[in-house]
Amino acid sequence: MKLSLSVPVEEEFDAEAARLIDARLASRLSEKDAELFDGAADAADRMGWVDLPQQAAELLDEIESLRARLQEQGLRTISLAGMGGSSLAPEVMAQTADVRLEIVDSTDPNQVAEAIGTDLEHTVLIIASKSGTTVETDSIRRSFAAAFEEIDIDPASRMIAITDPGTELETLAADQGFLATFLADPTVGGRFSALSAFGLVPAGLAGADVRGIVAEAAEAAADLSIDNLDNPALRFGAWLSIAHARTTEKLVLAETSPQLDGLGAWVEQLVAESLGKDGQGILPVVVDSPAEIGFSDARADALLCLLGPSAEDAELGAPSGFEATITGELGELFLFWEFATAIAGYGIGVNPFDQPDVEAAKAQARHLLDGPDSGTSEQARFREGNIDVLEVVDEATDLVGALQELFSQVDEYGYVGIQAYLDRIADAEAEGLRPLVSTHAGVQTTFGFGPRYLHSTGQYHKGGHPNGVFLQITGEARTDLSVPGRDFGFAQLQRAQAAGDAAVLIEKGRPVLRLHLLDRACGLEQLREAVGSISPHHHYGHD
């Protein structure tokens, strides 16, 4: 792989790189030395990722054998119920290989219903969960099982489990006689699991060349373990560390090669969840192309990272002076980013293997689901057109005023996080809000579909730099879908997850504007018009 870096102050970079080399950081990571992170239990129990490429031979054989069996049975549609680290890596592998892998990582009832209704007679469902109890994957499994039964197919004959040893999912798979069960290495954390069963099994069964991906990673492993500047992960980790020390903590990621389609979303999850804690961290901002990096008027708080060769036509150049281009094969890039992120965690001073703020939103969502209204009967502050405004940050009485109040709360070096609890496929146009809000709020802006982002940037939102404000969007369900064996449906679960995360953010002092679209398409258009009516770049309030 190739890495080029632009650093504004070379002596700072040289000093940080020397510090990391003196600590033997890269080689000690490859030796699984948890003392690098003060012996933290999460570090000691989460170092198995470093040698996954060397351990994969038997797993690859099992994947190829199972894929042949599925093809013999005419099972051609591979659906994956998994969240965050259990879905993003196989999604990248499948997109890169241009093979079809249906990712079901939503609680939007329409999106789940569409997934179930797509070629069910020829479908295999993979349920991927490290804990074995993830509410989204369990709910999706229950709904697929009911649908299989309706067409006289034994659900267990169409289900594959990927989980850690000893989980409820392993027990369920054994009791029901699932088609196959893959037990992953429990010492590999979810976001570092790209080269484990969680990444390789779904992608391989869908037809991606996972053997080639593992070989690419294995070939890169030696270079990523050396303690000198020939190690690209060490150089990049030092780059992130000194940028963070200079309060340049937004990592703008632009894919420049169709061969790396979707890599930005995987990197976003890895970096945000690993580094965003203790009031520190690096916030990834995934943009559609280098032409959309928005640096002409942005504050000098961002690093620019191109995933792939430099784009010839884009006028690049981060005002902070931090700019990088990374090229390579997918397997080596997976391992590179894992090493670089762990190295940056050491440099910044955080444990990259824990996620202390993730559970709070889950707990709040469970509390709302157990309540009498399951989070679905909230009283709106006011209604305007196709939008109910559920929560404002001050005293606004109209939509434009509410948006202006939200934007006015953003520090000059802060960010806006857009959280869209919508159908990631049918409502994909919502993603167009990100560049629009960035322009009119005048700061870097992220976008995530919920609850997908809860397993990704959600940790940073609550544990990272406390300079974010949040625009949360929910929508009236086009249809509802019950969760068999539960006293709630997907619409209730989705609304409870949104309300739960908002409650935790507000409790932590993060400003949140919550909007509910009564008609999704019309509401999104109304919201775009409202954002567009605000004068650009003059709404950050605090230095």
Image (cartoon, helix red, strand yellow):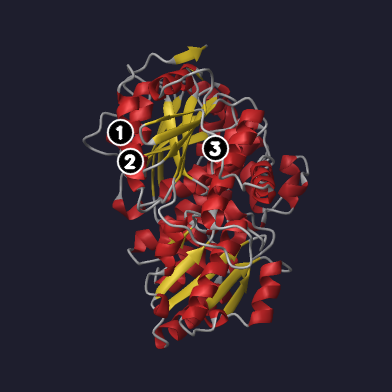
Residue drawn at x 42%, y 27% as measured from the top left: 444
Q: Are marks 1 and 2 in contact (CB under 8 Å)?
A: yes
Residue bearing mark 3: 237
Label 3 crowd (10 A; few <14 / some 14-19 / many >=20): many
Marks 3, 1: nearer the viewer? 1
Q: Position of residue 342 (x, y in %)?
A: 61, 43
Residue 204 - label: none
Residue bearing mark 1: 292
> Label 3, label 1: how many angstroms apart (C-alpha)?
25 Å
Mark 3 or mark 1, earlier in chain? 3
Name the residue type under label 3: Gly
Name the residue type under label 2: Asp
SS class, disc 1: helix
Marks 2, 3: nearer the viewer? 2
Q: Position of residue 201 (x, y in %)?
A: 51, 69
Residue bearing mark 2: 288
Q: Position of residue 130 (x, y in %)?
A: 64, 61
Name the residue type under label 1: Glu
Residue drawn at x 40%, y 34% as measured from the top left: 387
Q: Are marks 2 and 3 in contact (CB under 8 Å)?
A: no
Above/below status of 255 relative to 64: above
> Label 2, label 3: how many angstroms apart (C-alpha)?
24 Å
Most foreground residue, 216 or 222: 216
SS class, disc 3: helix
Res 330 quadrant in image: bottom left
Mark 2 or mark 3, earlier in chain? 3
